[in-house]
Image: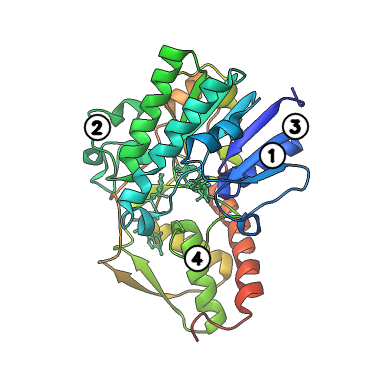
Amino acid sequence: MSDKLIVVGGGGGFIGGHLVADLRRRGFKEIRSIDIKPVDEWYQVFDDVENVVADLKLLENCRTACEDAAEVYNLAADMGGMGFIEANKAACMLSVLISTHMLMAAREAGTVQRFFYSSSACVYNAEKQKDEHVTPLKEEDAYPALPEDGYGWEKLFSERMCRHFREDFGLEARVARFHNVYGPEGTWEGGREKAPAAICRKVIEAKVSGKHTIEIWGDGKQTRSFMYIDDCLTGIDKIAHGDILEPINLGSDELVTINQLVDIVEDIAGIKLQRQYNLDAPKGVNGRNSDNTRIEELLGWSPNIRLRDGMEQTYAWIYDQYVSKYGTKAVGA
Ligand code: NAD
Ligand code: GDD
């Protein structure tokens, strides 16, 4: 198994970078990692991996990427947290070119035994996410379709395309619906960051600057569950190599309000901040949680790393990044 060629699309990104690192740890020797960003912007780079800079929106690049591959993991997408996806709907939908061309190329390669696609909880019907006291989302709640505008429609379409490539062409595609994933070695500033990293950065900014206030998007009462990267990697491996043919939730079911997320980060940082709520900022759905009944039934496992534990690792990494980039001076100060 370890000599088979494994291809990771989006390997310069957060989850793709961790996946490459994990594959190496597990003894895979032939790994090809592809990303559109220059290599010096990748979160994790390994010299013994074939690192390729290419735009996977283009079919010919996908063909080169998938050549001789035994397994393909497509984690490449133009994406981010609510601040990015609400303001870049067309860009998010253009990831359909990556999804389509990677599927076509994997099929054409003729060597691909497993194809993994990272879908999102953003495929779920918005009507089911209006209340912060949300009923956890089951897989069937994606239909009738009313996903997140832009990004969610692309994900729903692409996961459907995986299904039909499997049914019509025999490509062994597997799909997981990730719920908000966090951890070290990911985006923590610049506009694409999600709430866990953004809150860490804001708390660090407040601590370092001595200006003890924090801006929170929305009223802080909206709810989410957050999955630590190690759980995500475990789930990717199990789902990619298992027999679950329909898209399945891969997320934590530890529901918290955004205020509770801030409490956790304040506690880790040993600080209390004055909260300012920006009700005009991108908010997304009021509540979202993962129903893990199916994954527990089918795999006997579900993500289980406690938010507090994962946030300690995440905060420590972002703190180091922040201090090495800005010193102990506030951004813009
Ligand atoms: P990320 O932005 O860190 O990684 C995605 C990578 O894809 C980036 O490095 C980016 O440069 C690359 N990419 C974008 N366009 C490309 C192109 N045309 N050609 C080649 N590479 C391209 O995001 P992530 O958090 O690592 O997410 C990985 C996957 O998981 C994505 O498909 C994302 O939609 C999905 N997902 C992530 C989350 C989450 O919370 N992180 C939640 C749901 C779904
Ligand atoms: N990003 C961010 N930054 N969000 C904040 C902030 C902040 O400073 N302060 C509060 N929030 C709130 C947002 O308003 C939103 O209500 C909630 O925290 C979660 O925001 P995000 O983490 O940005 O995104 P999301 O959970 O709505 O959606 C994410 O998860 C999906 C999968 O579950 C996105 O990353 C999607 O791309 C992803 O597919």
Left or right: 3 in relation to 297: right
Q: Are marks 2 and 1 in contact (CB under 8 Å)?
A: no
| Identity, as a three-letter code, of the amino acid under mark 4 | Glu
Q: Which numbered dot is residue 189?
A: 4
Q: Secondary structure at mark 1?
A: helix
Q: Which numbered dot is residue 145?
A: 2
Left or right: 158 in relation to 190: left
Left or right: 38 in relation to 169: right
For the residue carrying disc 4, how many other residues have a C-alpha within 10 Å: few (<14), some (14-19), or many (20+)? some
* Residue in view at x 30 percent, y 60 percent: 282
Q: Position of residue 112 (x, y in %)?
A: 59, 21
Q: Is residue 27 above or below residue 167?
A: below
Label 3, label 4: how far apart the Cα atoms are:
32 Å
* Residue in view at x 66 percent, y 73 percent: 324
Mark before the other along the chain sequence, 3 or 4: 3
| Identity, as a three-letter code, of the amino acid under mark 2 | Ala
Label 3, label 1: how far apart the Cα atoms are:
9 Å
Residue bearing mark 3: 28
Label 2, label 1: how far apart the Cα atoms are:
34 Å
For the residue carrying disc 3, how many other residues have a C-alpha within 10 Å: few (<14), some (14-19), or many (20+)? some
